[in-house]
Image: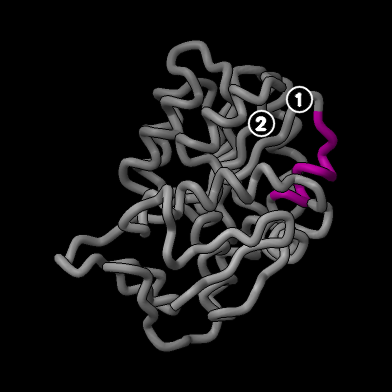
Amino acid sequence: MTRILVVDDEPQILRALRINLRARGYDVEVAENGTAALKAAASHPPDLVVLDLGLPDIDGVEVIRGLRGWTTVPIIVLSGRAGSEDKVAALDAGADDYVTKPFGIDELLARIRAVTRRLTVTAAVPALRVGRHTVDLADRTVTRDDGVEVKLTPIQWAMLDKLLRHPGKLVSQRQLLHDVWGPEYQNETNYLRQYMAQLRRKLEDDPARPRHLITEPGMGYRYRP
């Protein structure tokens, strides 16, 4: 059973999400502030976190950073902050998706299903090279030549997996959005740019001049072995 940690300081939202998620077979734990959320995640690691940004004690972006210090658990931000700067800050900190309040429960459930689908282990393929890194898609590990392991978030893994399984081939923007975020995503190309920039910072020797994770302007992306 998928375990979801819901973090929000609005009691009515916590109650509504607890009822709706449990009705659909999820195991749900709730927290009303950032401190409680970090403690809950450490003591009983969740499979997914739904997180409000406007918490009374710790800003939600700091909670994301705290979680990313030790876990790659998927994080869906649920927030009344609709500005692009807030979205970028949350995504840069390591969030995997962003839902703006007010929201429909069906939309949130679709986002949750999309994220949990991405966690499914896919068929094994040989280890691949990206610059000075060895990528094992089956074990979901990235190791530098000096032995240091590089941590990727679930979204970063999903994008990298899609590209590395089609070496040399163009993967269209629409295909990436569909396969990584879900069929309801068609025009959010800013998501692709944001996460590709993150992958390049982690894997390319010179992120500004990538040699392996290539952008085909207006079309998509390509993994060049």
Q: Are marks 1 and 2 in contact (CB under 8 Å)?
A: yes
Task: Give percent across and percent down for residue 158.
Answer: 56, 63
Give the amino acid type for the residue marked by disc 1 in the picture.
Answer: Lys
Q: Residues within 10 Å of mark 1 (few under 14, many from 20)?
A: few
Pointer 1 residue: 101
Q: Position of residue 86 (x, y in %)?
A: 59, 23
Left or right, residue 132 beside residue 190: left
Q: Quadrant of the C terminus?
A: bottom left
Label 1 secondary element: loop
Q: Amino acid at mark 2?
A: Leu
Q: x, y (%) of residue 153?
A: 46, 53
**From what the image shows, is residue 189 above or below residue 117?**
above
Q: Secondary structure at mark 2?
A: strand
| Left or right relative to 23: residue 37 | left
**Vertically, is 14 above or below 136?**
above
Q: Quadrant of residue 209?
A: bottom left
Residue under the point 74% across and 66% down? 175
Residue 113 shows in the view:
no
Whether residue 190 is visible, yes or no, is: yes
Q: Nearer the viewer, residue 134 or 209?
A: 209
- Type of secondary structure dominating the magenta stretch: helix
| 104 in the magenta segment | yes
The magenta segment: 103-111
